[in-house]
């Protein structure tokens, strides 16, 4: 075969390959479109892979999973020692049931009870149960706000997150190679009178849960004290994969979240139940909030706190999940404006770049809640 002919044939093969790529690969199409428009639209909502890194499936009905699949979501359901939720045993059983039904879309985090903390055998019992749960598929361990606000030691004093008695549990979470999700304290609104709170959801929650409304309990730890306890704990465990739930309870100021993330490179934060706090800030300074997400695109996890209650109507819950997920997408991914009643404002979308949305909505969660990577 002559050189010329060979070159011509190679050229034809190259043309054929590029034609078939253009015709069949969604990747090349996405790249072309991305060059034209840097942000997604509502039409992209269903097809882009997403991960809700903070939900509570307290009902074994398939409705949650079905809506997640329909809207392009994977879920991380977090078990919590919360008196309003079903028992820890029940939450555990539901997680195993749903994970068995659809391990691609359903993931879960385990937790432990503080009952018996400080008594002989507690640490060993908890650490053994965490090892069993991770072996069964748990991708994280949750510590709830009862540490710091509710649980007391034998002396009647509140048990704080940096209590030496919790260090071996943190060590076990690190050794098992999973993430620790910590809900520390409350949003700052919780220490303010109702009329000074920034969002209606906080006004409602703390009116309905006076036991957690710190403004009514001046004898309880202050907001700043709880933040300091948490920071001491994170500093003491630099190898722990630490997730600050609810924007690490620093939701009121993106600058403060940024300072936390800068100080502790082993941390990420989830956005669960704090979107309106972010919107409250972006209505006042959209560029500042937008730049926060761009700068910390590798450190923020999308999450909602959607809770599928044991007695909820499945069809109604599906509608609610779809409404929340669509509204959040409209805000973070597109430039569309929407009415947000919780802050009584018209909120323009952030239209974050596609690459940023892909991380916040998916890649970060996949990295943080990966299969266990045990470390010493
Ligand atoms: Zn939650």
Image (tube, helix red, strand yellow):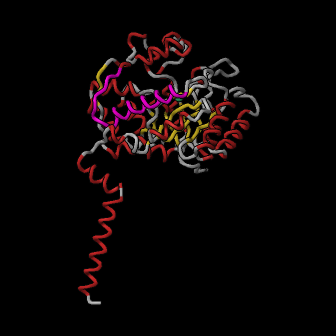
Instruction: Reply above or below: 179 against 192.
Output: below
Disc tally is 0
Give the percent coordinates (x, y) of residue 299: 42, 41
- Give coordinates of residue 256: x percent, y percent: 38, 30
Viewer-proximal residue, 45 or 150?
A: 45
**Residue placed at 48% from the left, 43% from the top?**
365
Q: Is residue 55 left or right of residue 153?
A: left
Of residue 211 and residue 309, the one placed in the foreground of this image is 309
If the image is split into quadrants, where does the N terminus sit? bottom left
What range is drawn magenta here? 314-340
The answer to whether residue 164 is above or below residue 32 is: above
Position of 54 with respect to 283 (left or right) is: right
Residue lying at 57% horizontally and 25% vertically, measured from the top left: 309
Give the residue displayed 67% in from the left and 35% down from the top.
93
Whether residue 205 appears in magenta in the rendering, the answer is: no
Where does the image place residue 312, in percent across and percent down from the top left?
56, 24
Specify whether residue 354 is in view. yes
Q: Nearer the viewer, residue 274 or 309?
A: 309
Residue most toward the right? 120
- In this image, 7 relative to 329: left or right? left
Q: Position of residue 143 (x, y in %)?
A: 58, 31
- Mark yes or no: residue 229 visible: no
Residue 307 higher or lower than 268, as above or below: above
* Helix, strand or loop for the magenta stretch, by majority: helix
| Residue found 56% across the figure and 38% down from its top | 180
**Residue 147, picture quadrant:** top right
Between 215 and 305, the one lying in front of the other is 305
């Amino acid at each position: 075969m002559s050189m010329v002919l060979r070159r011509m044939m190679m050229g034809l093969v190259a043309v054929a390959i590029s034609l078939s790529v253009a015709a069949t690969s969604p990747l090349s199409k996405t790249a072309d479109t991305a060059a034209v428009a840097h942000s997604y639209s509502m039409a992209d909502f269903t097809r882009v892979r997403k991960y809700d890194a903070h939900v509570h499936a307290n009902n074994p009905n398939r409705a949650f999973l079905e809506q997640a699949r329909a809207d392009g979501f994977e879920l991380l359901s977090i078990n919590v020692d919360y008196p309003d939720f079903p028992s820890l045993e029940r939450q555990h059983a539901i997680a195993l049931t749903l994970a068995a039904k659809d391990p691609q879309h359903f993931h879960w985090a385990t937790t432990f009870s503080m009952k018996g903390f400080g008594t002989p055998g507690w640490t060993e019992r908890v650490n053994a149960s965490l090892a069993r749960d991770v072996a069964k598929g748990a991708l994280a361990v949750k510590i709830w706000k009862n540490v710091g606000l509710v649980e007391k030691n034998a002396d009647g004093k509140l048990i704080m997150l940096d209590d030496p008695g919790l260090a071996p549990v943190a060590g076990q979470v690190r050794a098992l190679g999973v993430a620790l999700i910590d809900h520390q304290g409350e949003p700052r609104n919780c220490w303010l009178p109702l009329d000074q709170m920034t969002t209606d959801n906080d006004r409602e929650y703390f009116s309905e849960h006076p036991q957690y409304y710190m403004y009514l309990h001046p004898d309880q730890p202050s907001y700043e004290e709880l933040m300091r306890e948490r920071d001491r704990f994170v500093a003491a465990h630099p190898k722990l994969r630490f997730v600050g739930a609810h924007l690490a309870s620093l939701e009121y100021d993106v600058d403060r979240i940024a300072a936390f993330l800068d100080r502790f490179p082993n941390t990420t934060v989830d956005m669960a139940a704090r979107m309106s706090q972010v919107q409250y800030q972006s209505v006042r300074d959209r560029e500042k909030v937008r730049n926060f997400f761009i700068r910390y695109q590798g450190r923020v996890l999308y999450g909602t706190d959607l809770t599928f209650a044991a007695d909820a109507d499945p069809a109604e819950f599906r509608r609610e999940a779809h409404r929340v997920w669509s509204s959040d997408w409209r805000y973070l991914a597109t430039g569309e404006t929407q009415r947000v009643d919780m802050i009584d404002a018209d909120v323009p979308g952030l239209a974050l770049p596609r690459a940023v949305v892909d991380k916040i909505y998916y890649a970060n969660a996949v990295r943080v809640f990966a299969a266990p990577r045990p470390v010493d």
